[in-house]
């Protein structure tokens, strides 16, 4: 379980170190094991910042974050991350990128090859194991990035708009694959997106943030089986509510 208690995050203003800008204001939230939580909210509201805090890349200015009762003080293999931008090493093949994560886990070298191939198979990339990132499509690169995250065997998968640069069809295919993985492996997923349709298709809970400074304004629990029919009355209703709430935030109204 992840627990954020009274988290405030401020960054110093570069030109004037005596001033700080609050980007997250007193956020508290619990994420249970096996939840699939989507963060949604306007650009700049702090979604990536929350993810970075959970990943341990950033430290809160005030408040504490716990993972399974232990305070998060830095990154750990129990929390794997996939970013929006392709973060593969360009000079290494798909397989070598995955092997690097296995090496970091101190997996013996003679086991790395087979394990990397198994992981690439999970994301249907075993056929492209020897190709370098610049010869792969955007969707293929993100699949390799997912395989690399899975190499850590993380309990918690943190994903920051991983498919937002991809076309709608590829995105939707990868969304189903992530849901499948989540169901099969019983992991916890925290997934940032700005696409409402994506959030309602994949999430078991949607958390809506408002901006300047970021605050949680509303949540939706979606207890509907996968794959979901976005045209069903229930899904249309949730979509309408989220769109309306986002419009209100953008127009500066209180919800
Ligand atoms: N290292 C940093 N130093 C200073 N300000 C930062 C830093 N990182 C983020 N910010 C600021 O914090 C705010 C929240 O940023 P964040 O990236 O978390 O937003 P976001 O919700 O992920 O936005 P987007 O949807 O555009 O990705 C922004 O105003 C941003 O300028
Ligand atoms: Mg972001």
Image (cartoon, helix red, strand yellow):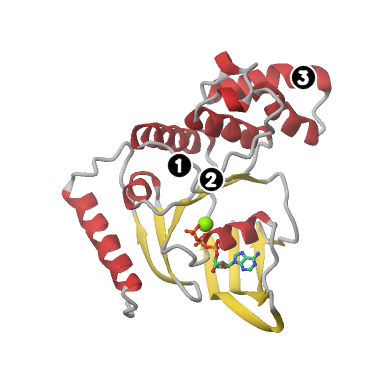
Where disc 1 sits, the SS reads loop
Q: Where is 144 relative to 52, above or below?
A: above
Closest to the observer: 91 or 194? 91
Q: Distance between the residues labelled 2 and 1?
A: 7 Å
- The answer to the question of whether label 2 and label 1 lie on touching residues, with beta carbons closer than 8 A, is yes
Q: Which residue is drawn at 45% across and 62% down?
A: 43
> Quick one: label 1 or label 3, which is nearer the N terminus?
3
Q: Quadrant of residue 98?
A: top right
Secondary structure of residue under mark 2:
loop
Q: Mark 2: is the Cβ under 8 angstroms from ligand 2?
A: yes
**Disc 2 crowd, CA 10 A, few/some/many (<14, 14-19, 20+):** some
Q: Quadrant of the N terminus?
A: bottom right
Instruction: Provide residue 150's location: percent of width, then percent of height.
Output: 62, 34
Q: In which quarter of the image is ligand 1?
A: bottom right
Q: Position of residue 2 (x, y in %)?
A: 59, 59
- Outermost residue, bottom side: 18
Sooner in the amino-acid sequence: mark 2 or mark 3: 2
Q: Residue at 51% of width from left, 76% of height from top?
A: 213
User: 217 or 47: which is nearer to us?
Assistant: 47
Which disc, if any, is residue 111? Answer: 3
Residue 97 point in image, percent of width and height: 69, 29
Report which residue position mark 1 lands on.
Answer: 165
Q: How crowded is mark 1: few (under 14 residues within 10 Å), some or many (20 or more)?
A: some
Rounded to the nearest angstrom, the CA distance separating label 1 from label 3 is: 34 Å
Q: Residue 51 in the image: x percent, y percent?
A: 58, 57
Quadrant that contains the C terminus: bottom left
Label 2 and label 3: CA atoms lie apart by: 30 Å
Label 3, residues with CA under 10 Å away: few <14, some 14-19, many ≥20: few
- Residue at the disc numbered 2: 84
């Amino acid at each position: 379980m992840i627990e954020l208690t009274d988290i405030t995050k401020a960054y110093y203003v570069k030109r004037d170190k005596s001033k700080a800008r609050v980007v997250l204001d007193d956020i508290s939230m619990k994420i249970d094991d096996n939840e699939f939580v989507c963060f949604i909210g306007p650009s700049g509201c702090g979604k990536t910042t929350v993810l970075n805090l959970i990943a341990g890349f950033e430290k809160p200015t005030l408040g504490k974050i716990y993972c399974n009762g232990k305070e998060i003080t830095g990154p750990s293999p129990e929390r794997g991350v996939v970013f929006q931008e392709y973060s593969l090493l360009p000079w290494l093949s798909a397989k070598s990128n995955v092997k690097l994560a296995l090496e970091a886990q101190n997996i013996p070298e003679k086991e790395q090859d087979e394990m990397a191939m198994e992981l690439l198979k999970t994301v249907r990339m075993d056929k492209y194991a020897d190709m370098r990132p610049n010869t792969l499509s955007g969707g293929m690169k993100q699949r390799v990035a997912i395989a690399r995250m899975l190499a850590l065997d993380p309990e918690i998968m943190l994903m920051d708009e991983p498919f937002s640069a991809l076309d709608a069809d590829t995105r939707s295919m990868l969304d189903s694959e992530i849901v499948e993985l989540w169901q099969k492996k019983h992991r916890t997923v925290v997934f940032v997106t700005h696409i409402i349709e994506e959030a309602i298709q994949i999430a078991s809970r949607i958390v809506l943030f408002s901006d300047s400074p970021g605050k949680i304004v509303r949540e939706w629990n979606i207890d509907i089986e996968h794959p979901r029919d976005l045209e069903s009355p229930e899904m249309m209703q949730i979509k309408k509510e989220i769109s309306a709430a986002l419009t209100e935030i953008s127009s500066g109204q209180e919800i």
